[in-house]
Amino acid sequence: MDIGVFILFALIGTSLGTFTGLTPGIHVNNIALLALFLYGAGFNPIYLASLVVSAMIAHTFLDFIPSTFLGAPTEDTALSVLPMHRLLLRGEGYKAVYLSAVGSLLAMLFALPFIFLLQVFFSFISYDEVKFYIPIILISLVLYLFYLESLKSVKKMLLGIYVFFVAGIFGLIVFHLPQNYNFVPADIGAGLLFPMFTGLFGIPTLFLSSKTKVPKQEIKKEKIGKESYKAALYGTLSGALVGFLPGVTSGIASVVARGVYGSDEPEDFIVSLGSVNTANSLFNLAALFIILHPRSEAVGVVGSLVKFHPWINFVHPPSLFILLLLSAFISSFFSFFLTLFFGRLFAKGIERLDERYGKLSMGIMVFLGILIFLFSGPLGFMVAFVASLIGILPPKFGVMRVHLMASIILPVLIFYLA
């Protein structure tokens, strides 16, 4: 293996992850599918694994930009929309992007020692033993979310419970629908999850912001203080939950992290969510070698591309894992500066729109609708429509959007209880 070519593929992956991160509706799983195609064409699988991992990390940095300026989130960044839009409407959209990039970069540093600790943990306890407690953990997280609503009022808690079960029942229905109604021979997500999450989070946000007037944006960086480091640390720890536990999303982990470190500032929440997303990808990669159960399609493709050995010896991690960590660090270094660069471009471009911002929001809604129709068919379009009606409930009720994550939590919970 040529280390120079390996690094080159890491840089190509970073470029591809930048594209997927900046383009609403395009997922990093597309890069994983491209890697499988190239593998069939005879490319070195280790180089392709480097490409997928670096694209995955870059995506976690760059996808905060459309979440901030365009309001078209993925399931991972959906909960960041309101805090980041709050800063956008104060003329601080670039600061929001900068804080998320800082959180992602800090997660790369904070995650390393915890990856080794988890390896030690799972060397004494098998993952099958841990799976027994997954329903208990999920139920505890759900009750904690209801508790956070109860701190506002009993009414808010009841409304949160209502949204949770409506979204959860809807998720159960979607998971039992046919998943192959696409009109084009490609996959941009996981079946009907793309229209479901676009409907639950993206379209309501775009609709509600269609009449928004965006003020002039300041291009300035936020001073990173003790609270930001604290938020990044707790976000990284919460990212481990996402990387190893099914049904726990980045959004839920961020809410838990915020509850633990006790800050209601949008700046700290954004740092935390940036850390959760990047740590999630890193711990997901570690899960492939430690428990042999990847938690994402992209990491699953990495596992199918290369012959990897389980990480058994704490002192000597597999050489392939070290190489893929190198790809992740190369990608994070360049992705940080790419995020700041494109963040400036978006901040300068968005203020030129003035009253046309609403037209941009409507245009993105149409674009997402076309993607849904092409890749999910009429059934996906119907799923997105119903999901949009459900997704509008939390902002109207004044409860957290995290309850919409029941669309995944409830099916996973029932699966494990059954």
Image: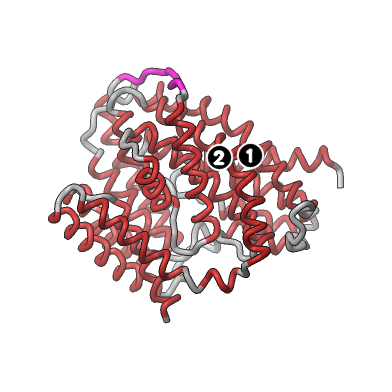
> Quarter-wise, where is residue 155 in the image?
bottom left
Q: Main secondary structure of the magenta part?
A: loop
Residue for point 81% across, 41% down: 5
Observer-nearest of 13 and 169: 169
Magenta stretch: includes residue 276 = no
Residue position marked by numbered label 2 in the rendering: 107
Q: Position of residue 236 (x, y in %)?
A: 52, 44
Residue for point 51% across, 47% down: 237
- In this view, the residue farthest toward the front is 124
Few, some or many C-alpha atoms within 10 Å of disc 2 (few <14, some 14-19, many ≥20)?
many
Q: Amino acid at mark 2?
A: Ala
Label 1 sits on a secondary structure element that is helix
For the question of whether residue 73 can be seen, the reply is no
Find the distance from the CA under tag 2 to the CA under tag 1: 17 Å
Residue position marked by numbered label 1 in the rendering: 14
> Quarter-wise, where is residue 113 in the image?
top right
Residue for point 55% across, 63% down: 185
Give the label on residue 90, or none. Answer: none
Q: Position of residue 227 (x, y in %)?
A: 42, 30
Quadrant holding the C terminus: bottom left
Q: Amino acid at mark 1?
A: Thr
* Magenta-tinted stretch: 216-223
Magenta stretch: includes residue 219 = yes
Few, some or many C-alpha atoms within 10 Å of disc 1 (few <14, some 14-19, many ≥20)?
many
Tell me: 100 left or right of 185. left
Q: Earlier in the sequence, mark 2 or mark 1?
A: 1
